[in-house]
Image: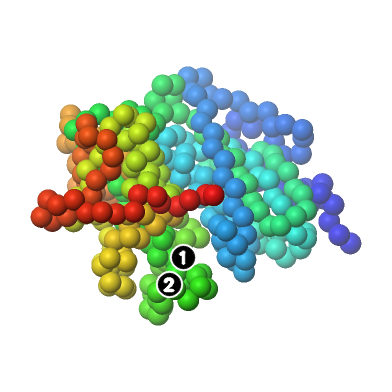
């Protein structure tokens, strides 16, 4: 017997809504939520489409992990705490084995990152997943793209280029590079399907950073959003980019540099820090409480410029990922 929409929701998703602040969750026309006093809501939404944002043969669990985590990355970039999410699930068919795997993976990550499913929709059609994530932040404390000042230092968390390198594993055009190292392949698959939302970093940076966002479309393109929103430019020192040694060993340097600068899908944080807060940020790094690297400074001169070891400007792609 085919699952109806309501039995599908009841069987696979109704148990994912137990969390503080949920007065009424999955199963009614709307969720009813209680926002803590003195907090503001932050909300984001992403749609992932089969064959565009993940391979058509991706497992249900991998899809669930990626769909939730890319939204959590946006919450992290705002210095916010994730609370609740809704799910719009479009399915070619309601296969119980697929739904079981998807809902288990979604529940695992929801529990790990402290957020609850509070509603959504299911419908028939080509496979796509839309998640709207809602979080909270103390009033007036949200990190935005528009607060940087000239002279602020530019930082990125973690390492760059691995998300873009992972796309080579799915490229069937024959024009990409082959990655034969099994350990490297596994690292790249983990980075693609399970990007680590930098939620704890975002909370630590809330009082220290002047502007922030997550790197989804590529460092140069996303840093350009901070520059544009702040009415500034940015100078990036290429020799300071955090690139994992194992990634640098896979292919020739120009390819690795392109992955790091414009490949996208890293879901690390890019943030700016005013001079007076640099000691506090560097102390967090020294203590191991923040994995981040300083890669340049904000400038009065508009545009994002890349500078090599000799202080010379290097021409790079500034487009990043294009949605259309």
Task: Identify the residue at image location x=69%, y=39%.
Answer: 119
Q: Position of residue 207 (x, y in %)?
A: 31, 29
Task: Identify the residue at image location x=43%, y=49%.
Answer: 216
Q: Residue furthest right?
A: 1
Q: Position of residue 240 (x, y in %)?
A: 20, 53
Q: Position of residue 45 (x, y in %)?
A: 57, 40
Image position of 316 (left or right of 175): left
Q: Is the Cβ of the residue at disc 2 closer than 8 Å to that at disc 1?
A: yes
Q: Residue furthest left?
A: 310
Q: Quadrant of the N terminus?
A: bottom right
Q: Quadrant of residue 132?
A: top right
Q: Residue furthest bottom?
A: 180
| 245 vs 255, nearest the viewer | 255
Q: Residue furthest front?
A: 315
Residue at numbered disc 1: 167
User: Which mark is drawn over residue 43?
Assistant: none
Residue 29 visible to the viewer: yes
| 251 vs 288, nearest the viewer | 251
**Local crowd at mark 2 within 10 Å, few (<14), some, or many (≥20)?**
few
Q: Position of residue 55 (x, y in %)?
A: 58, 65
The Cα atoms of the two marked residues, 2 and 1, are separated by: 9 Å
Q: How is the image coloured?
A: rainbow
Residue at numbered disc 2: 176
Task: Identify the residue at image location x=59%, y=52%.
Answer: 48
SS for tag 1? Answer: helix
């Amino acid at each position: 017997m085919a699952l109806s929409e309501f039995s599908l929701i009841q069987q696979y998703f109704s148990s994912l809504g137990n969390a503080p602040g949920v007065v009424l969750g999955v199963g009614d026309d709307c969720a009813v939520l209680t926002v803590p006093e003195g907090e503001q809501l932050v909300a984001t939404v992403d749609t992932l489409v089969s064959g565009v944002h993940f391979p058509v043969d991706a497992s249900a669990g991998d899809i669930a992990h990626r769909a939730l985590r890319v939204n959590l990355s946006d919450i992290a970039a705002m210095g916010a705490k994730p609370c609740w999410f809704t799910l719009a699930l479009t399915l070619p068919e309601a296969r119980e084995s697929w739904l079981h795997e998807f809902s288990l993976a979604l529940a695992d990550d929801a529990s790990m990152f402290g957020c609850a499913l509070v509603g959504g929709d299911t419908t028939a059609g080509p496979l796509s997943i839309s998640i709207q994530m809602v979080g909270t932040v103390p009033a007036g404390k949200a990190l935005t793209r528009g607060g940087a000042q000239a002279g602020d230092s530019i930082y990125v968390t973690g390492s760059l280029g691995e998300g873009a390198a992972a796309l080579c594993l799915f490229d069937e055009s024959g024009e990409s590079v082959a990655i034969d190292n099994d350990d490297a392949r596994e690292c790249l698959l983990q980075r693609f399907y399970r990007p680590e939302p930098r939620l704890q970093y975002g909370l630590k940076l809330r009082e220290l950073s002047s502007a922030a966002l997550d790197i989804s479309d590529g460092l140069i393109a996303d840093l350009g959003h901070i520059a544009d929103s702040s009415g500034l430019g940015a100078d990036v020192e290429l020799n300071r980019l955090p690139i994992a040694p194992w990634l640098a060993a896979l292919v020739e340097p120009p390819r690795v540099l392109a992955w790091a600068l414009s490949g996208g899908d890293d879901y690390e944080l890019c943030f700016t820090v005013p001079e007076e807060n640099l000691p506090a940020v560097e102390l967090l790094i020294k203590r191991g409480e923040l994995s981040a690297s300083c890669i340049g400074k904000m400038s009065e001169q508009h545009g994002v410029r890349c500078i090599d070891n000799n202080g010379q400007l290097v021409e790079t792609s500034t487009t990043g990922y294009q949605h259309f």
